[in-house]
Image (spheres, rainbow, N blue to C red):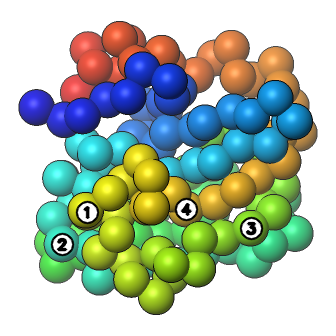
Amino acid sequence: MSHIPKALLYTKDHEWILVDEDGTALVGITDYAQESLGDITFVEFPTPGESFSLADTFGVIESVKAASDLFMPIDAEVLEINQDVESEPELLNSDPYEKGWLLKIRIINSSQVDDLLQAEAYAQLV
């Protein structure tokens, strides 16, 4: 059974988002996603300063099993990428919710937060 923290919001594409009061958020992949991918070997990140619309592809995760697109959970500008994951992609397997976050973003359209899945709804999806 995948670990699904209640404090996070989720997408149907298995990304999570942690919204901060200052209008920024962290984005990552869920425990379910990393389990499905297997041993992660590479992450292709966007460039800080790039903006994306909801559901745009912002990167790719490669594993020993497959490559998978990463989708932006909300209209946002990329503020920062997780350098630790860039150099140690296996952090996504060992700690997808803490050390394995992918992006820090600035939320452009905060009304989209209401459309994200609560933990209970995501749990039913997986």
Are the residues flagged by discs 1 and 4 in contact, CB closer than 8 Å?
no
Secondary structure of the residue carrying tag 1 is: helix
Rounded to the nearest angstrom, the CA distance separating label 2 from label 1 is 7 Å
* Residue at the spot 38% in from the left edge and 12% down from the top edge: 121
Between residue 74 and residue 17, name the one nearer to us. Answer: 17
Residue 91: quadrant of the picture: bottom left
Q: Is residue 100 left or right of residue 83?
A: left
The type of residue carrying mark 4 is Leu
Rounded to the nearest angstrom, the CA distance separating label 1 from label 3 is 21 Å
The mark nearer the N terminus, 1 or 3, is: 3
Q: Residue at label 1?
A: 93
The type of residue carrying mark 3 is Glu
Are the residues flagged by discs 2 and 1 in contact, CB closer than 8 Å?
yes
Rounded to the nearest angstrom, the CA distance separating label 1 from label 4 is 12 Å
Secondary structure of the residue carrying tag 3 is: strand
Secondary structure of the residue carrying tag 2 is: loop
The mark nearer the N terminus, 2 or 4, is: 2
Q: Residue at label 3?
A: 80
Q: Quadrant of the C terminus?
A: top left
Q: Residue at label 4?
A: 102
- Which numbered mark, 2 or 1, is in the foreground of this view? 1
Q: Position of residue 82 (x, y in %)?
A: 59, 71
Q: Residue furthest left?
A: 1
Q: Residue at label 2?
A: 39
Q: Is residue 125 left or right of residue 1?
A: right
Q: Quadrant of the N terminus?
A: top left
The mark nearer the N terminus, 3 or 2, is: 2
Q: Is residue 55 visible?
A: no
